[in-house]
């Protein structure tokens, strides 16, 4: 389901595939992102799918957001071994074929880790080979994959596309989010005082997000000329 105005205007907006956090859902991510100002939301076309697998255990958002809950893939305690990872990549590519074309990705938590890895995996020819290049990223509470088998492909070269990073002051993933930031060539950063969550945009955050969206429009306009 897309969020945006009339069809004509929609065509000129960056179309963004939004990947939710572990054991949440597209609907939950949508509720959180829609707290952002209209000045941001009206300039993009957002699509919020559910992950491929029903949650295989308790969700951290139980009692806050209603089920059903989903996950993109499963992992061990150290976050170094992943189950159904190839199935997850195939599922995202299928979504992009059926509901695309998409210009960029937005991700929160597990969805952010996934989003940030996809441009590198795509460049290496191991994921998203049948869809257009990912042109930008919005990373909220993200990190890098730890498994060498994924990491050596995903981060083999710096992440070239523009990226917007939300770093929470008390987010347990913040150190890993900073590490991911170092792999990005064209990053924009929003610092917020909260933890592992999707923050509202304060004045400074809105200014950075607006600059990022201007950068995206330049990138997409440049692509159209080629």
Image: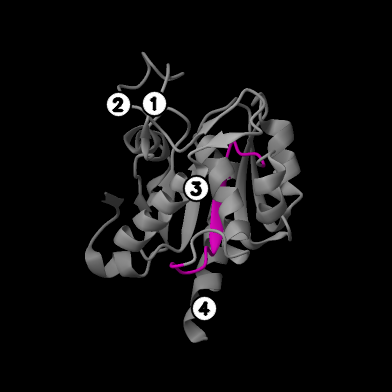
Horizontal side of 30 relative to 122 (left or right) equals left
User: Which label belongs to residue 55?
Assistant: 1
Distance of label 4 from label 1 (alpha carbons): 39 Å
Between residues 5 and 39, which one lies in front from this camera angle? Answer: 5
Secondary structure, mark 3, is: helix
Horizontal side of 217 relative to 189 (left or right) equals left
Q: What stretch is highlighted in magenta?
A: 130-144
Q: Nearer the viewer, mark 1 or mark 3?
A: 3
Distance of label 1 from label 3 (alpha carbons): 18 Å
User: Which label belongs to residue 99?
Assistant: none
| Residue 144 x/y as whole percent | 67, 42
Q: Which residue is drawn at 58% across and 42% down?
A: 113
Are the residues flagged by discs 2 and 3 in contact, CB closer than 8 Å? Answer: no
Which of the marked residues, 2 or 3, is nearer the chain's N terminus?
A: 2
Q: Which of marks 4 and 1 is in front?
A: 1
Distance of label 2 from label 4 (alpha carbons): 39 Å
Residue that badge 2 annotates? 68
Which of the marked residues, 3 or 4, is nearer the chain's N terminus?
A: 3
Identify the residue at the far bottom of this view.
Answer: 226
Secondary structure, mark 2, is: loop
Q: Can residue 42 be seen in this view?
A: no
User: Which label belongs to residue 223?
Assistant: 4
User: Which label belongs to residue 86?
Assistant: 3
């Amino acid at each position: 389901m897309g969020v945006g105005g009339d069809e004509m205007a929609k065509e000129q907006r960056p179309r963004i595939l939004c990947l939710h956090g572990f054991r949440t859902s597209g609907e939950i991510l949508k509720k959180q992102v829609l707290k952002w100002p209209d000045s941001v939301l009206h300039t993009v076309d957002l699509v919020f799918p559910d992950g491929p697998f029903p949650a295989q255990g308790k969700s951290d958002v139980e009692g806050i957001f209603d089920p059903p809950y989903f996950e993109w893939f499963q992992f061990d305690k150290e976050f170094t071994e992943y189950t159904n990872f190839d199935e997850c990549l195939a599922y995202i590519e299928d979504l992009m074929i059926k509901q695309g074309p998409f210009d960029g990705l937005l991700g929160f938590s597990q969805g952010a880790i996934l989003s940030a890895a996809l441009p590198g995996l795509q460049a290496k020819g191991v994921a998203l080979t049948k869809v257009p290049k990912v042109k930008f990223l919005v990373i909220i509470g993200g990190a890098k994959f730890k498994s060498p088998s994924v990491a050596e492909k995903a981060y083999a070269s710096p992440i070239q596309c523009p990226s917007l990073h939300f770093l929470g002051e008390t987010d347990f993933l913040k150190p890993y989010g900073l590490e991911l930031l170092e792999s990005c060539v064209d990053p924009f950063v929003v610092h917020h005082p909260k933890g592992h969550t999707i923050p509202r945009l304060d004045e400074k955050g809105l200014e950075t997000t607006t600059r990022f969206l201007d950068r995206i429009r330049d990138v997409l306009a440049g692509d159209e000329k080629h």
